[in-house]
Amino acid sequence: MDRIIGPGGAGMNLDNIKVCARCGVRYDWRKSASSTLKMTYCSSLCESADLGFTVDALLRARRAQRPEPEPVSPTV
């Protein structure tokens, strides 16, 4: 798909057009709202619907701190 189509000298390069893994829509991956999975999903809505979360949200989330266990005293 390296044909150049459209008006003008540059036209449109079909190498930039991908197909969304969830909805099957063709999109220009450079304009995808997903900053981490641009080559897979057309939007963060499709990413969230397919994965159950967005990778961006996962990367921003902080790990919950586990409370430190209390020392166990030896039983006699």
Image: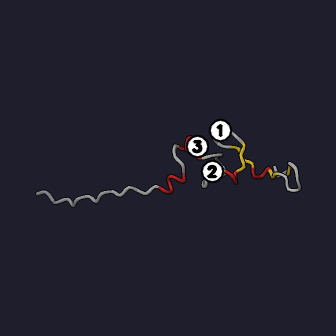
Establish if 40 lies above or below 74: above
Give how far apart the Cα atoms at labels 2 and 3 are.
9 Å
Judging depth in this view, the residue of 72 and 44 nearest the camera is: 44
Residue type at mark 2 is Ala
Establish if 25 lies above or below 10: above
* SS label for mark 3: helix
Is 34 on the left or on the right of 25, as rendered? left
Residue at the outermost front position: 8
Q: Position of residue 73 (x, y in %)?
A: 16, 60
Judging by the rendered image, the residue that carries numbered circle 1 is 23
Residue type at mark 1 is Cys
N-term-proximal mark, 2 vs 3: 2
> Which color scheme did the rendering employ for the protein?
secondary structure
Residue type at mark 3 is Leu
Q: Position of residue 38 (x, y in %)?
A: 65, 52
Which residue is at 58% across, 43% downward?
A: 45
Establish if 21 lies above or below 71: above
Residue neighbourhood size for the residue with mark 2, other residues' Cα within 10 Å, grouped as few (<14), some (14–19), many (≥20): some
Residue at the outermost left position: 76
Judging by the rendered image, the residue that carries numbered circle 2 is 33
Give how far apart the Cα atoms at labels 1 and 2 are.
15 Å
Is 61 on the left or on the right of 42, as rendered? left
Residue neighbourhood size for the residue with mark 1, other residues' Cα within 10 Å, grouped as few (<14), some (14–19), many (≥20): few
* SS label for mark 2: loop
Mark number for residue 45? 3
Contact between labelled residues 3 and 2, with CB atoms less than 8 Å apart: no
Task: Please state, as top left, top right, bottom left or bottom right, where the C terminus lies in the image.
Answer: bottom left
